[in-house]
């Protein structure tokens, strides 16, 4: 029993007071009897047990409450910590996003400001160039008028000179045969409108009820050309809009059948500079079998300068059209003539001559449709270059054809036009994919009637150049038409040797003329074939 008591402190604490009381009662005889002692002891023991149980219950309850409280506190603390962590993460994320957004906005703002600044600078430069061109044009007109009047004007005749400037300007442009100065480009067309598109697109238009007068498959270009007769007055924009509604804006090109001219040689003298004298090429150029295409007028292949040349002719004329052999004969002689006293720049070349210009009222003219047919044929001949010594208005179909040909690796060189410093841009030279050529004399001065503008790329000899003339003669003429062949030979030679980045190397090897760098008079400068 004592061992149980020692092992149970709480029971010991309860039993000990009760035992002490019992001893006291036992040793005090007469105080209580045995029965009374038992009752008292039992009562006392019950009270002690009740108190002990109460304490244990209270302690158990307190512990349970404490545990619950601790769990609640832990849960609340965890929730608070999670909320605080989420808030901190959200704030950090928001700050990062705000910083990134600010950086993006700053970058966009900087780019916009840079673009605006570049546009403003370009506009200012364009205005300055236009002002310079206007001033140069006025000076040239005044000089020309004064030269024409000469001694007929006395010292007080300057007023008459001023009055005649406008008249001379008009007369100068009328003397040229370039279509770019014949008037409003929208009126330079025959009575047809044209569609250029893929075969499936044409089938769709036919299914929608469109009727075509003539449809030609362009095998080299992989396109279909449709010609439709038009009344004397029609709205090409309305026609284009109707087709767009049916097939979409990028499925076909629609335009009128514009007119182009090969120009009339501006004969200057009986002397002049032979091609090899006007510009020296590397000696191997005379032996290279270059493949050169050209779209021009007729060619007098019986001329002594051309009778031994390798020239392949194919005609692309209107029904009943008759070619003249003036402009084409002059241009091809600069390329490949092979006579005892006169040779072209590359006499061993194989020339593919597409005759698309015909006689009309003393001019040599062609249509957009005939030129497209000619270019389609040339695109199939594995050429090194195509020479276009022609000019006229812009045309959507012609632009698409030229872009497709150049994208396939055939460079196109075109004359810049002979409309004068104030003339509008001449096409196809003004298309971005074309190399536009102006003319200079033997002192590197620009040809007085050459076009000027942002589309010019290169300069080449084109003033007082000696060439073959139909009928067996030789004469000298001036014009950008005679400058283009020099650049065509330079391009063909680089293509023959498979030079990469051809345009870049061609432009960087020039002799800079005029203001430093590119300018609207000489482009990047005079070509330098030996450089």
Image: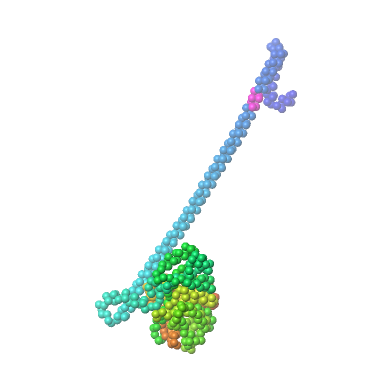
Residue 52 is covered by the magenta coloring: yes
> From this viewpoint, is residue 343 visible?
no
- Looking at the figure, which quarter contains the N terminus? top right
Q: Which residues are magenta?
A: 51-57
Query: Which residue of the protein is positioned furthest toward the left in this rendering?
Result: 156
- Would you identify the image quadrant in which residue 179 lies? bottom left
> From this viewpoint, is residue 228 visible?
yes
Q: Nearer the viewer, residue 19 or 318?
A: 318
Image coords of residue 485 (percent x, y): 46, 79
Give the residue at x 48% y 87%: 302
Image coords of residue 327 (percent x, y): 44, 81
Where is 17 relative to 195, above or below?
A: above
Where is 485 relative to 112, above or below?
A: below
Give the residue at x 64% y 23%: 51
Q: Nearer the viewer, residue 341 or 404?
A: 404
- Would you identify the image quadrant in which residue 126 lies? bottom left
Give the residue at x 60% y 32%: 66
Residue 358 is covered by the magenta coloring: no
Q: How is the rendered protein coloured?
A: rainbow
Image coords of residue 154 (percent x, y): 26, 80
């Amino acid at each position: 029993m004592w061992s149980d008591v020692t092992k149970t402190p709480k029971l010991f604490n309860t039993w000990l007071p009760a035992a002490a009381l019992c001893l006291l009662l036992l040793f005090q005889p007469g105080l209580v009897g045995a029965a009374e002692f038992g009752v008292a002891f039992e009562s006392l023991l019950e009270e002690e047990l009740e108190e002990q149980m109460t304490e244990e219950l209270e302690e158990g309850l307190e512990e349970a409450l404490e545990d619950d409280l601790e769990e609640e506190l832990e849960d609340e603390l965890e929730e608070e910590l999670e909320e605080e962590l989420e808030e901190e993460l959200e704030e950090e994320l928001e700050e990062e996003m705000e910083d990134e957004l600010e950086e993006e906005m700053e970058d966009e703002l900087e780019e916009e400001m840079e673009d605006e600044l570049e546009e403003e600078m370009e506009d200012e430069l364009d205005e300055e160039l236009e002002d310079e061109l206007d001033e140069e044009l006025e000076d040239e007109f005044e000089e020309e008028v004064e030269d024409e009047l000469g001694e007929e004007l006395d010292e007080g005749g300057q007023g008459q000179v001023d009055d005649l400037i406008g008249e001379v300007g008009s007369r100068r442009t009328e003397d040229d045969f370039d279509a770019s100065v014949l008037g409003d480009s929208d009126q330079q067309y025959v009575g047809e409108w044209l569609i250029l598109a893929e075969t499936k697109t044409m089938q769709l238009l036919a299914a929608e009820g469109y009727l075509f007068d003539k449809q030609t498959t362009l095998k080299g270009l992989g396109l279909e050309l449709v010609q439709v007769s038009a009344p004397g007055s029609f709205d090409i924009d309305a026609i284009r809009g109707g087709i767009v509604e049916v097939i979409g804006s990028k499925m076909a090109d629609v335009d009128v059948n514009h007119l182009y001219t090969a120009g009339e040689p501006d004969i200057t003298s009986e002397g002049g500079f032979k091609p090899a004298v006007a510009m020296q090429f590397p000696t191997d150029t005379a032996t290279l079998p270059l493949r050169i295409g050209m779209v021009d007028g007729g060619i007098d292949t019986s001329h002594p300068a051309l009778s031994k040349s390798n020239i392949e002719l194919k005609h692309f004329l209107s029904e009943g059209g008759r070619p003249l052999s003036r402009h084409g004969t002059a241009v091809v002689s600069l390329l490949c003539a092979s006579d005892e006293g006169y040779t072209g720049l590359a006499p061993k070349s194989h020339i593919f001559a597409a005759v698309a210009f015909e006689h009309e009222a003393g001019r040599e003219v062609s249509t957009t449709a005939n030129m497209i047919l000619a270019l389609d044929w040339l695109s199939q001949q594995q050429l090194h270059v195509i020479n276009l010594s022609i000019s006229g208005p812009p045309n959507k179909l012609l632009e698409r054809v030229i872009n497709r040909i150049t994208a396939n690796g055939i460079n196109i060189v075109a004359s810049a036009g002979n409309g004068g410093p104030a003339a509008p841009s001449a096409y196809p030279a003004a298309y971005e994919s074309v190399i536009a050529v102006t003319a200079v004399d033997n002192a590197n001065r620009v040809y007085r009637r050459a076009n000027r503008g942002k589309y010019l790329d290169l300069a080449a000899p084109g003033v007082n150049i000696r060439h073959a003339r139909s009928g067996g003669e030789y004469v000298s003429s001036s014009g950008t038409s005679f400058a283009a062949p020099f650049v065509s030979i330079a391009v063909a030679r680089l293509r023959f040797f498979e030079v990469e980045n051809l345009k870049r190397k061609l432009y960087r090897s020039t002799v800079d003329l005029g203001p430093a760098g590119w300018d609207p008079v000489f482009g990047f400068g005079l070509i330098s074939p030996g450089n």
